[in-house]
Amino acid sequence: MTRLRTFTSPDGQTLAYHTLGEGRPTLLLHGFMASTALNWTGPGLTAKIAAMGRQVIGLDFRGHGASAPHNVHAAFPPDVLAMDVEALLSHLGLGDVDMVGYSMGARTAVRLLVRGFRPGKLVMGGMGDTGATTIGSRMTFFEDCLLNGERSAYPIAAKRMADMLAAQGLSPLSMLKVLTSQVPVDPSALRAIETPILIINGQDDEDNGSPEGLAKLFGHAEAKRVKGDHMTAVGDPALGDLIWDFLGRG
């Protein structure tokens, strides 16, 4: 069972993180409108990685998961998710970690790379070239659904989002703040990054662009596919097997 802990961000926000196991630290970053529990612990990935002889650290981003009750009225300045990760690593006194991010967590990992952080290894799931570098169409889609609900251009998706927020007790306002905190990435800044990177998407997941195209932006990245789409691929056991194999190399 994971252990829940908290720390204070530089702007005074209480943020929650979960830990399991001992050994090389491996930081897990979840997706938008999700949490450590939903993306990692529920599908069994937290336990699978800990079983490798690793200490797993799962941050609940501000506005999400166990951090949500503390941050409803908090400010979300530009790039705040990456800054919160940096603050957690500083709080824990960690400089050498491996990192696994899904969707928004993967995009945050890219921001961390651009800001100068270098994990030993990085796994990104549910991410592609446009999602990692731009903030336009994907953000517009989410904003439309959150603000306009069933009157949006995507009423089915809007209903699904509303159900997800209600089930987790999340604030639509916090989710909008997350979206507006996003900043773009210059693709040319990624070529010189030498971190070994594995990108894993569902076979039917192009929500954030092409994972193969994203791999080409880096110097040492590979892309693989598992079954499913953006919502379901994280539950495919093959995703966990690929993470296990990649983190275990060397």
Image (tube, rainbow, N blue to C red):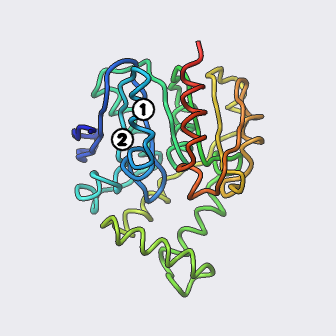
Mark positioned earlier in the residue sequence (2 or 1): 1
Is residue 212 toward the left or the right of residue 81 in the image?
A: right
Residue 198 lies, in percent from the top left, at 64, 32
Task: Please tell me how crowded label 2 is: few (under 14), some (14-19), or many (20+) other residues with Cα within 10 Å.
Answer: many
Q: In the displayed structure, would residue 36 be above or below residue 229? A: above
Residue 236 lies, in percent from the top left, at 57, 48
Residue 133 visible somewhere in the drawing: no
Residue 158 visible somewhere in the drawing: yes
Residue 25 lies, in percent from the top left, at 39, 23
Q: Amino acid at mark 1?
A: Leu
Q: In the displayed structure, would residue 35 be above or below residue 19? A: below
Are the two marked residues, 2 and 1, in contact with CB atoms closer than 8 angstroms? Answer: yes
Residue that badge 1 annotates: 27
Kindly indicate the quadrant of the structure image that contains residue 244.
Answer: top right
Dot 1 lies on which element? strand
Residue placed furthest toward the front: 237
Q: Residue at 39% of width from left, 32% of height from top?
A: 86
Is residue 75 toward the left or the right of residue 103 in the image?
A: left
Task: Please tell me how crowded label 1 is: few (under 14), some (14-19), or many (20+) other residues with Cα within 10 Å.
Answer: many
Q: Residue at 66% of width from left, 50% of height from top?
A: 227
On-image quarter of the C terminus: top right
Residue 113 lies, in percent from the top left, at 56, 31
Dot 2 lies on which element? strand
Q: Amino acid at mark 2?
A: Leu
Residue that badge 2 annotates: 59
Between residues 134 and 168, which one lies in front from this camera angle?
168
Q: Residue at 37% of width from left, 39% of height from top?
A: 58
Q: CA distance from mark 2 to mark 1?
A: 8 Å
Q: Residue at 36% of width from left, 21% of height from top?
A: 94
